[in-house]
Image (cartoon, grey):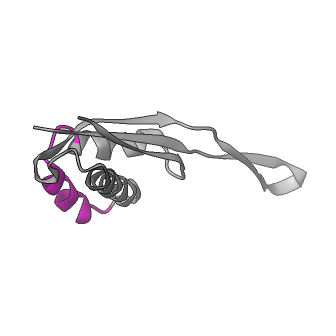
């Protein structure tokens, strides 16, 4: 039985988060959390907390053995960009797009 967790509007670009998501896809949950703990990326912390949340969801349901969980599927989709304006010389404006992403994690039992 699958267990899911979602993080929406994460303040990180989707392309940067996909680099971290590719490293943990298909791995055991304990190995994935251990790898993410020592990674120096902003999205690694977010994905680690998301996997821990999915494990907590599995414990709450009491249908799955938590020790045998692995990351079945992890997707990072692009969310809406926050548009900001940075003022530049001679009265001009420079657009800044703060990108967001939606991260979905699905865990399953081996």
Name the foreground residue: 75 vs 93.
75
Given the current orientation, which residue lies at the most extreme front position? 62
Residue 64 position, x and y percent, is: 19, 45
Question: How far across and how far down the image is residue 38, in percent?
Answer: 22, 65
Q: Residue at x 63, y 38 (%)?
A: 80
- The residue positioned 17% from the left and 37% from the top of the image is 26
Name the quadrant containing residue 73: top left
Q: Is residue 35 magenta?
A: yes
The quarter of the picture where residue 100 lies is top right
Q: Position of residue 16 (x, y in %)?
A: 40, 45
Quarter-wise, where is residue 27 in the image?
A: top left
72 versus 37 height, above or below: above
**Image vertical order of residue 107 relative to residue 84, above or below:** above
Left or right: 4, with 34 as reference point: right
Answer above or below: position of 71 versus 88.
above
Q: Which residues are magenta?
A: 25-40
- Number of numbered discs visible in the structure rendering: 0
Q: Quadrant of the N terminus?
A: top left
> Depth check: 90 or 73 in front?
73
Direction right: furthest residue: 91
Q: Which corner quadrant holds the C terminus? A: top left
Depth order, front residue of 55/77: 55
**Magenta segment: does it hold 105?**
no
Going 85% across and 48% down the picture, which residue do you hit?
92
Question: Which percent across, then down, holds residue 20?
Answer: 30, 47
């Amino acid at each position: 039985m699958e267990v899911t967790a979602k993080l929406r509007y994460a303040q990180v670009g989707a392309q940067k988060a996909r680099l971290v998501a590719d490293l943990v896809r298909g791995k055991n949950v304990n190995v994935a959390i251990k790898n993410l703990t020592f990674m120096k990326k902003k999205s690694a912390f977010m994905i680690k907390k998301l996997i821990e949340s999915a494990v907590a969801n599995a414990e709450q349901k009491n249908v799955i053995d938590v020790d045998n969980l692995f990351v079945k599927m992890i997707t990072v989709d692009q969310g809406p960009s926050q548009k900001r304006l940075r003022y530049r010389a001679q009265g001009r404006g420079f657009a800044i797009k703060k990108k967001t992403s939606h991260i979905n994690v699905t865990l399953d039992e081996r």
